[in-house]
């Protein structure tokens, strides 16, 4: 059990906030019901849809001991609008990454909402602590999606946990219970897992997307440069090969969802196509260790496998 202010988390597992529309109400509520921190990916959602997803998740949460969070990329153009929407909707925790915002600390200063920045260096970890973060998520370059460092999580954790006093969750490479145990031995109080929760019954992506995770072999995840200006880990696919070769089709329209964009491709569009099962044109973000995933299981089964690690 972990206490952060008035929040009590029975099982210190954060389900990664995977956008776009991978981590939604059904998955987040299932995680919260098991005593973890369920996360809705707020990035690229219209404000009304984000509010509705939070409401839907609240209606599905029937057990106490967990929490509900929203993850929002700082890189999106409506970042603060989404943050304020989530706070107004009564979210427990705001998690943010893909950039760093100092302004958000002032916004949350008088709120009950907790703030968990995602950081990848000791410098940012100490800045987040000084500004008033309630906890931090330390994410390595072996995590899925957009990344803030080339170093794996295992190589950056100890330096950070030894030098901050607030709770630290380790992210990147946590697929099996022994990975979580390794994080705890590096000083983390808990873990964040994204990829493992994609391959669950409650995750609202296509069966094709989940099967790509199950079928993935070691070395099938490669680093690309996202149009958001950050490196990212993705499963090899026809579209990934085009990105690597510079032969991808350029976007024909833009809704200016990012504050900075290379316009080399629309990362939002390609992620949505991937989640829908578009084998040729989709983009499939994933952590480098998804080759360890061999099955699609329920969220309850994930927790059954991992709980013994936190009960030692």
Image (tube, rainbow, N blue to C red):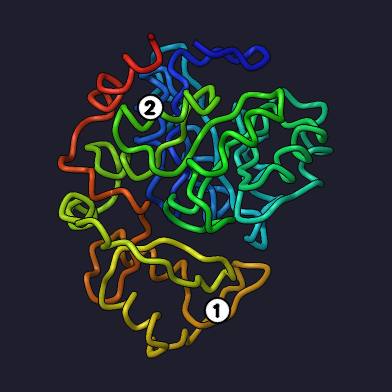
Label 2 residue SS: helix
Residue 278 percent location from the top left of the image: 24, 69
Name above or below for residue 150 compared with residue 239.
above
Residue in the image at 15% along x and 54% along y: 215
User: Residue 203 appears in which quarter of the rendering?
Assistant: top left
| Residue at x 46%, y 35% (from the top left corner) | 192
Calculate the distance from the C-alpha at mark 2 to the C-alpha at mark 1.
34 Å
Label total for image:
2
Please name which of the two marks, 2 or 1, marks the residue nearer to the observer.
2
N-terminal-most mark, 2 or 1: 2
Which quarter shows the C terminus?
A: top left
SS class, disc 1: loop
Residue drawn at x 82%, y 30% as measured from the top left: 109
Q: Residue 151: horizontal and vertical position, in percent? A: 52, 53
**In this view of the protein, which residue sits in the foreground, 215 or 205?**
215
Residue 118: x %, y % from top left? 61, 43
150 displayed left or right of 224? right
Q: Out of 208 and 123, give the one closest to the viewer.
A: 123
- In the rendered structure, the answer to whether residue 165 lies left or right of residue 65 reads right
Q: Nearer the viewer, residue 155 or 270?
A: 155
Task: Locate residue 260, reporting x and y percent.
Answer: 66, 72
Q: Any mark on residue 12, and which?
A: none
Is residue 157 placed above or below 205 in the rendered structure?
A: above
Q: How busy is the neighbourhood of tag 2: few (under 14 within 10 Å), some, or many (20 plus)?
A: many
Q: In this figure, which residue is indicated by the disc labeled 1? A: 254
Write down the residue under mark 2. Answer: 31
């Amino acid at each position: 059990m972990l206490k952060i202010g008035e929040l009590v988390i029975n099982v210190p597992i954060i389900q990664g906030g995977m956008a776009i529309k991978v981590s939604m109400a059904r998955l987040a509520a299932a995680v919260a019901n098991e005593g973890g921190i369920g996360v809705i990916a707020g990035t690229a959602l219209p404000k009304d849809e984000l509010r509705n997803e939070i409401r839907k998740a609240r209606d599905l949460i029937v057990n106490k001991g967990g929490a509900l969070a929203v993850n929002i990329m700082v890189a999106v153009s409506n970042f603060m609008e989404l943050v304020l929407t989530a706070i107004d909707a009564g979210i427990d925790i705001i998690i943010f990454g893909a950039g760093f915002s100092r302004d958000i600390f002032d916004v949350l200063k008088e709120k009950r909402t907790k703030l968990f920045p995602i950081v990848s260096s000791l410098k940012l970890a100490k800045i987040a602590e000084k500004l008033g973060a309630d906890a931090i998520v330390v994410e390595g370059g072996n995590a899925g999606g957009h990344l803030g460092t080339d170093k794996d999580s295992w190589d950056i954790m100890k330096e950070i946990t030894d030098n901050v006093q607030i709770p630290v969750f380790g992210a990147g490479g946590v697929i099996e219970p022994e990975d979580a145990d390794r994080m705890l031995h590096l000083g983390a109080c808990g873990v964040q897992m994204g990829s493992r929760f994609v391959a669950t019954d409650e995750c609202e992506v296509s069966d094709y997307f989940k099967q790509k995770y199950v079928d993935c072999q070691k070395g099938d995840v490669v680093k690309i440069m996202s149009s958001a200006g950050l490196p990212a880990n993705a499963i090899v696919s026809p579209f990934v090969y085009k990105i690597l070769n510079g032969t991808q089709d350029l976007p024909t329209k833009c809704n200016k969802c990012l504050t900075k964009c290379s316009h080399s491709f629309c990362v939002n569009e390609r992620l949505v196509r991937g989640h829908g099962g578009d084998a040729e044109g989709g983009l499939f973000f994933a952590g480098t260790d998804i080759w360890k995933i061999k099955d699609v299981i329920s969220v309850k089964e994930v927790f059954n496998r991992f709980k013994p690690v936190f009960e030692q």
